[in-house]
Amino acid sequence: MSATDTALPASATARTRPRGTLLPRLGTFSLFALPGIALYLAFVLVPVVMSFVSSLTDENAMHPVTHFVGLSNYRQLLSDPSFHRSLGNTALLTAAVVVVPNAVGLGVALLLDRGSRLYRMLRTVFFTPVVLSSVVVSVIWQALLTDDGIINKVLRSLGAEHPPGWLSDPSLALGTVTFIMCWQMLGFCVVVHLAGLQGVPAELMEAAELDGAGPVRRFRHITWPMLAPSVTINTVMLLITAFKTYDQVQVLTNGGPGDGTTATVAFTVITTAFTDNRTGYSAAMSLTMLVLIAVVSVVVLRVLQRREVTL
Amino acid sequence: MPRTTSARRTVVLCAALALLTAGCTAGGGAGQASDGSKTMTFLTFETPNLDAAYWDAAIARASKAVPGVKIKKLVAPSADRNTYVKQLAASGQLPDIMISVSPDGLAQSGKLAAWPAATLDDYVSPQSNPIGGKIYQLPYNTQPTPLVYYNKTLFRAAGITAAPTTYKDFLADCAALKKKGVNPLVVGGGGKDTWADGFPLIAAVGTDVYAKDPHWLAERRAGKRKFTDATFTSALNKVKKLAGSGYIDRSGLSRDYASTEQAFRDGKGAMYPMGSWFAASADSKKPPFDVGVFAWPGDNGADTVPAYTGGGISVSSSAPDVKLAQKWSAAFMLDKQNLDASVRSDGSLIAVKGYTPPTTMGPVYKATVKIYQDAARRGSVVNAFSVETGDTGLVPGLSDKLWAGTAELIAGRTSAGALARRLDGEWAKDAG
């Protein structure tokens, strides 16, 4: 592009662009875009379309012949108590996993927002669970939380005759799984909030301090609004992570104790497909889950982005 | 940038991508090799005893016996091979050969090749677990499931001098142990291993249901029986009463399978209802006490032994050469060293004609074999409820619901009648 072009309005440059320059640009652009598009098609779009097609059938590993059933699977979902239960469990777990690590993570980030070596080391400590596999984390916690595990041994030594059945009591098991997820995701929230805190201009804080604003007012009127982007990132990431919860439930409780007390939607999708063999019905569940995650994520994103501050 | 160059680049890139995606074939490289041999995938699983070196050596021996086959070994990522195989099948990557995978579901949908009668002639029970009248898994191994392994030291401490022979004696022994402050029964079922809570129920169904009606589950499939029938509900009630009397330690419901075995080894209970594979473990890694074994007794003293025969290799109907795959699999299955390894590591009761186990096997294994052989002579071996597959098995998915319900029964959160009604409801749903 010549220097004279830059002086013209965009519309004018578009009109005066010499013919024959767009296609080469598209060719170059496609060179870079094509691998990404191909991977997206192969690993996201095509499987989604295949799942949708499967959800309109009675596909079952036990039946060699598959029939088209239209929306019958989706209608069945509306009256399926085990799906409703897993949806309720997922909603509870998601609500807690979105709020708790976000809030606690912010508190921890404020405490760790210092430059010394000790605080840098503590950041690493908090972030470590995030990089561990969910399965590994779950196995470790399971060893701690069984009825005769380390935690209950400590409680017994402190005089508790009947310590809680963290994983065997239906009224506690979902809370236990939720706590473990919150614990694992805390480090992620801390790091994102710390990054957000780095973006708060020091001169703003100094000016507010000079004007007599205390720590609480400075946090409320400067830090909190400036942290809006990191709250948005955390919320959306936690929302998606929590909604897809499978590994922790599989390892810690296998959906129990008893009948589906900790079964999440993802867990129910997998068991319906590969234990019950009802592949078509399971595809309908997973598509429903996809739509739910998409809708909730978009709504939450819109709401949170509205309050984001641009300086 | 000249237009022709960019267009050429685009074409080259597209071609490269096409080649790349063409290389990502399902199944991972099965087919014909350049030397004319057939490459086939073989799904194995690894345990501390059946490690990578074991499988590699076993595969090499079978390949030596049957030339023309190149095996590409696959390893299941977890103990749950059945779910993994279904996932592979759903993505068009069913292994050509697979061992110890339930044929249920795969066979009915035409994904497995039936074994010819000539191959089955080598086995003691050639018609075990038929599906549509055909056999899809080589019945090489019998596993009594469960027998009751017990801690002789704790028995002596409670004044018990012999293993119980009637259910009344069994309850009396439980009471004596409890009075001594000993947990009578070690039962698991935590984490991913919910199935581990099922052994008392399998045993009770054996004595109360199958001993009277060996074809009860086949009749249930035909709609002639219900879980709410008095005989089945009485078996459920036995488990509930055992737990209600404090004879099953409820904290076990949070223990996974490995922790459950460890709890028995640690003396956290006197009796351990478990499959015969524990015999090998008890002999090879002896606990700090002598282990005895008896069959779960019935009301009238008939010690019914529930057992499952199967566990062998299945072959995919879409293997590059099904006959060759079956020939190789038969050689693998009948290899003496492989069978000996299975006996040593898994306490297998090999169901191959003419096979004799290693003479070096320990006392718990020998006692286990004797109990099974005595029951076989008396004709009191029955199917192991929920373990059986095929035409006489539970509908897919029901066993998971059964173990979840059993956990509620043991924890005192449901009644036998309510669980039976729920199972009938789930049966109708899963069979549909």
Image (cartoon, rainbow, N blue to C red):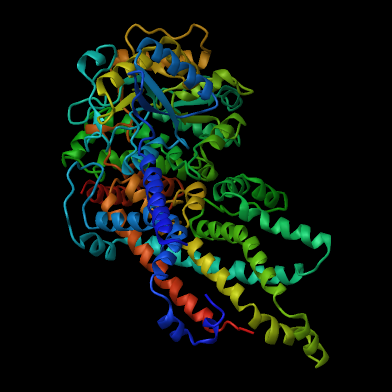
Nearer to the camera, B13 or A114: B13
Nearer to the camera, A83 or B215: A83
Residue at 59 percent across and 35 percent down: it is: B268
Q: Quadrant of residue A46?
A: bottom left
Q: Is residue B278 visible?
A: yes
Residue A199 relative to residue B374: left or right: right
Residue A153 relative to residue A202: left or right: left
The x and y percentages for residue B74 are: 43, 31
Nearer to the camera, A41 or B216: A41
Rendered position, B283 above or below A233: above
Residue at 61 percent across and 73 percent down: it is: A230
Q: How many numbered discs sit on the rendered protein?
A: 0
Rendered position, B180 above or below B70: below
Q: Quadrant of residue A63?
A: top left
The x and y percentages for residue B210 are: 27, 30
The x and y percentages for residue B179 are: 57, 36
Nearer to the camera, B235 or B61: B61
Rendered position, B251 above or below A234: above
Residue at 53 percent across and 45 percent down: it is: B254
